[in-house]
Image (cartoon, coloured by chain):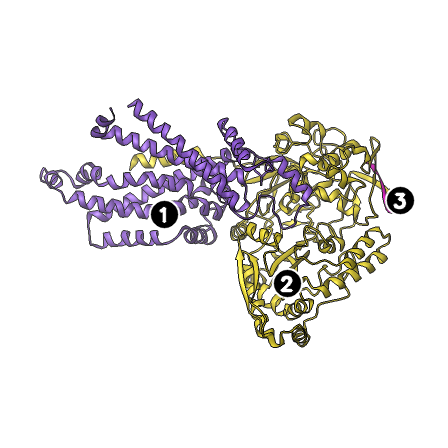
Amino acid sequence: MTRFVARRILEVIPVLFVIVTLVFFMIRLAPGGPFDAERNVSDEILRNLEAYYNLDAPLHRQYLDYLGQLLWGDLGPSFKYPGWSVNELILTGFPVSLELGLYALLVALGIGLTAGVVASLKPNTLRDYVPMSLAMVGICIPNFVLGPLLVLAFGLWLGWLPVAGWEGPSYKILPAITLGAGYAAYIARLSRGGMLEVLAQDFIRTARAKGLTEARVVLRHGLRGGLQPVVSFLGPAAAGLLSGSFVVETIFQVPGLGRFFIQAAFNRDYTMILGTVLFYAALILMFNVIVDVAQAWLDPRLRDEIG
Amino acid sequence: MKRLARLTLCVLLCCVGCAKSGPPALRVGNGTEPQGLDPHTVTGIPEHRILGTLFEGLVDVDPDDLTPVPAVAESWTISDDGKVYTFTLRPEARWSNGDPVTAHDFAYAWQRILTPALASEYAYMLHCLKNARAFNEGRITDFDQVGVKVLDEHRIETTLENPTPYFLSMQIHYTWFPVHRKTIEAFGRMDERGTRWTRPGNLVGNGAYMLKRWAPNNIIEVVANEHYWNAAQVRLKRVFFYPIDNLLTEERSFRTGRLHLTGSVPLAKVPVYQRKHPELLRIDPYLGAYYYRINVTRPPLDDARVRRALAMSVDRVALTKNVLTGGQAPAYAFCVPDTADYTCASAVPYDLDEARRLLAEAGYPNGEGFPRIELLYNTSENHKLIAEAIQRMWKQELNIDVGLLNQDWKVYLDSQNNLDYDVCRAGWIGDFVDPVNFLECFTTGNGNNRTGWSSPKYDDYIARAAQTVGQKARFDLFQQAERILLEGAPIIPIYYYTRVYLKSPQVQGWHSNLLGYISFKHLHLAEAGP
């Protein structure tokens, strides 16, 4: 088992290396540079800037220097925000994105599972159609539409919740719902499908025949199998929630990493692009390793195979 | 389910946080996250707002009419040739840690920003100092040769290359602010960017406020500085700057009372506020021009008659009234009218007959044989609306086919720099109130020209104006230069910007000026909200 885990972790390194290399050279191909602005700086000042940030060295030299820096965990200074290093910006932005992603996941699971299970108990009745239609709507409404609608209702008309910012618990409700809603809808449909399949099986009939209460049948026997598809969806969902929060962060002025990530590309902030891409890549690869390990641990056949 | 509910509750309780108490704060929507708080390495307007609270230059301006008033310098003298300024600093001026502000601090700051190794993008603001440019470009290495001389602790003398009538009012720009040497050198070298000296707790400034909190992309909080020489007069004790780049989010934050002041207003909301809440909407004149550049190196645009025909057939009144709606003024010249009492006497008229005649004279009667040209703009809804309107005008009036091309910001800048366009959208916001700030852009080889246009006569007028003492004589030269610019028509002036924003009636002591300069120390908050 230890060997398996070690091997999976070691496999991550070449993947990250390929990503760094590709991104490093690709961003240099994009037109425009980090110091282009509406008002041009003189050639002399541009030369000073390029010298300061080592951009005047040959490209392969810059690449090797960057790799050398990376070995020490140093992602370099941000070009756009000279007051901060890329490491610092990731360290301040990511916890916020993580927190937002976590709440959104709770929202998605809470709403999604409830709706899915409720719908599956009385298929093809009103109790099925209503939550499932809502789920369909939830999947179809993009979060840049849902966010402003929620703000309009709960922030401006009712005045219950703040419309933007990230200062206290009440500020986190609308962004979490906006980000989680799409996933909730998806989970609702997945869990309904899973539950319907399981509830039609023989062992459920046996359980009912034993005289168990309906609640016990559903919660104890049904859920375990019915949630299988939801569990396997959680991996990609978590990754999506963490790296895909840019729109929600912009709508609600949430100080997360998503805004830095997207703006870096527009700003041609080379080090920031590389740093955030690398960080997200490492994060997602790490998730995959954890999922693989968990699956191996759960599934005895796999465990035997890897020794 | 129960476990889930408990978990949710725990998480919510964990993040109960920052309900902070203290004096009432002015809450300002400040556009984007500032690049930093080192006055020598930043370039933008959001940065200017914040730095203006944390630092103070030798001279400040009256926020109503922008005339120079004493700040760190209590007085100054100007030599007869307009080239030597001697400032006397007030002895009571203090840094936020209590150290006295001395002439050495200014000399140190100016040396720092001009040091080539620091690579300050805005160092050119100081190029009016004698030999500053040569020092900044590394042609001389001895700072003693630059026109800055510390006479004693409280007196500093600056010698300029040319008489520069706007020299005093330039001092409100952050590039001229002093910095605290000990603080900078405690965290790194003098010419090092991005050290930790600008962080809350580290930053030592000499402005009316000091830095309390800085959470990137979230908030910057400044509080009144008790060591400020004029602290007794500062009524507003706290300011929160929020970097809200989404205009809709900013407007919603204003509507719920989270902001007292916004940086802008979404275009679609302007008529709504005009109708329902005119008392909240402010439209101020602004020192900026929106115009189109023409690439004069590409036929048929290399013919001045064609360029003038294009410029004369833009109906700016219809554009500002029907498309923009934010009180913008149609522009028939480049310099904003009444810039330091200068208003251009010549104009590109809206004259369709003359435009058609010029086009025919250039060999394209009724647009026949005129090749299709492309109009480039950077991705934005407003630029697109304007481009579409002008595309239609040129088609209808001149029978010219124009294609629209939008590019992402950096790609668009790259296209302009490489003269890889026919006609493109541009804008210029003045740094200080003097026509030279606008007209200098189109001298030969200027980095902001980007049209390929060059006129030795134009360059000569601008160069002569720089040597001239006396506003009248200078302005005469500018008049002649601007006439050449409009006749050569490498640009099509379209409209003069306005600053459209929202302001709560709670904000008192408000002032508006051409630069959009906000003097926070002159403001205060009324007790009750609207």
x then y, percent, for residue B521: 70, 43
Q: Identify the residue shown where x is 43% and y is 40%.
A: A100
Residue B47, picture quadrant:
top right
Which amino acid type is marked by label 2?
Gly
Instruction: Please tell me the colour of chain B.
Output: yellow
What's the amino acid at mark 3? Ser
Write down the quadrant of residue B189 in the picture: top right
* Helix, strand or loop status at disc 1: helix
Q: Are marks 3 and 2 on the same chain?
A: yes
- Residue at x 67% of width, y 49% of height: B508
Q: Which residue is mark 2?
A: B327
Q: Secondary structure at mark 3?
A: loop
List the residue tagged with mark 3: B79
- In this rendered view, identify the residue nearer to me: A184 or B32: B32
**The C terminus of chain A: image quadrant:** top left
**Is-magenta flag for residue B499?**
no
Chain drawn purple, letter?
A
Residue on which disc 1 sits:
A181
